[in-house]
Image (cartoon, helix red, strand yellow):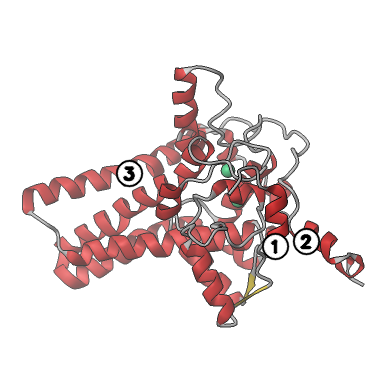
Amino acid sequence: MAIADNLSPEQLDQTDFPAYSPPAERAAEPKPAALSEKLYMVAAVVLPPVGLFAGMALAWQHGFMGWSYVAMFVAGWILTASGITIGFHRLITHRSFETHRIVRAFWMMMGALAVQGSPLVWCAVHRRHHSLSDQPGDPHSPHLEGEGFWAAIKGFWFAQVGWLFSGYWASPELERYVPDLLEDRLLVVVNKFYYMWVLVSLAIPSAIGYAIDGPWGALMGVLWGGLARVFFTHHVTWAINSVCHLMGSHDYESGDESRNNPVCAFLAMGEGWHNNHHAFPTSARHGLEWWQFDTSWLVIRTMQMLGLAWNVKVPPQRILDARRVTKK
Ligand SMILES: [Zn+2]
Ligand SMILES: [Zn+2]
């Protein structure tokens, strides 16, 4: 008999929607990243904005590059950012719904093309964030640099970009944080050949551009559909770590400084309702009010209606009411 069979409906709700994660046993500070790992990160952080500026300089000199490249930027952003939010975040990190293996593989592929690390590393870092949110050991809290103006600036910078150069990324402690995912062969293979996905992420827009405008199109494709798009999705995702732990409303008890921020929600496919998410980490829906824009939820809900997603978790109203700290 499954454990859940012995639980009352109320206990079951509590099981599905545990209160915010209690602080885990303190993990040891990771060893600092090696020089080679830091250099890789420098390339990952610096090359995308270099590509954006090169694209802007060429547009300044030669005029508007054409709508095909705008479309590549926008489509690439929507698909790969959704791969992160629906695939890496809500599906495998928090198991907020289940789906067919082929659909799961599709979202893993889209997430890998966002160039934010392999699914295993991304999930391990993110689970660590939830277990130690805004406390020592949180890989990217903006609140651990002390008091005062400069500490606030330093904290923001660390949460947005600086943490990528720390040992948290280089030593993600996979056995500790994602033992379940290490048993998934698909994820282990994607993890092993992750760098191939980085190349594919740049090669696809380059090839489409070549088909449209020849060698000039290949260059425009890799700059706008590749590097500029990666730059945009990187910083929007990282803003969830920085801005959404600093600015916005704190509507639900979550034991940390997480915030609901509508601008981040719009740009990050619904992930900006970050206080909702910290309060109910296993919910597939982050925009819990009807007006809280959450495209990732709309996609998951549509998949559910089409029979492509099941066991979709959403907290019941009475649990929402019990944990609410701001009055409606
Ligand atoms: Zn957070
Ligand atoms: Zn999360």
Q: Position of residue 133 (x, y in %)?
A: 64, 38
Mark 3 lies on residue: 47
Cβ atoms under marks 2 and 1 closer than 8 Å:
yes
For the residue labelled by badge 2, is the local secondary structure a helix, a strand or a loop?
helix
Q: Residue at x 75, y 52 (%)?
A: 18
Which of discs 2 and 1 lies nearer the camera? The answer is 1
Depth check, mark 2 against mark 3: the one in front is 2
Residue at x 58% of width, y 30% of height: 32
Name the residue tied to disc 1.
316
On screen, residue 180 versus residue 44, left or right, reads right
Instruction: Give whichever of 178, 280 is nearer the camera.
Output: 280
Query: Does any portion of residue 36 appear in the rendered image?
Result: no
Q: Position of residue 138 (x, y in %)?
A: 63, 35
Tell me which amino acid carries mark 3. Answer: Leu
The residues bearing labels 2 and 1 have C-alpha atoms spaced at a distance of 8 Å
**Left or right position of 115 against 19:** left
How many residues crowd around disc 1 within 10 Å: few (fewer than 14), some, or many (20 or more)? few
Q: Nearer the viewer, residue 316 or 129?
A: 316
> The residue tagged with tag 1: helix, strand or loop?
loop
Can residue 303 be seen by looking at this rendering? yes
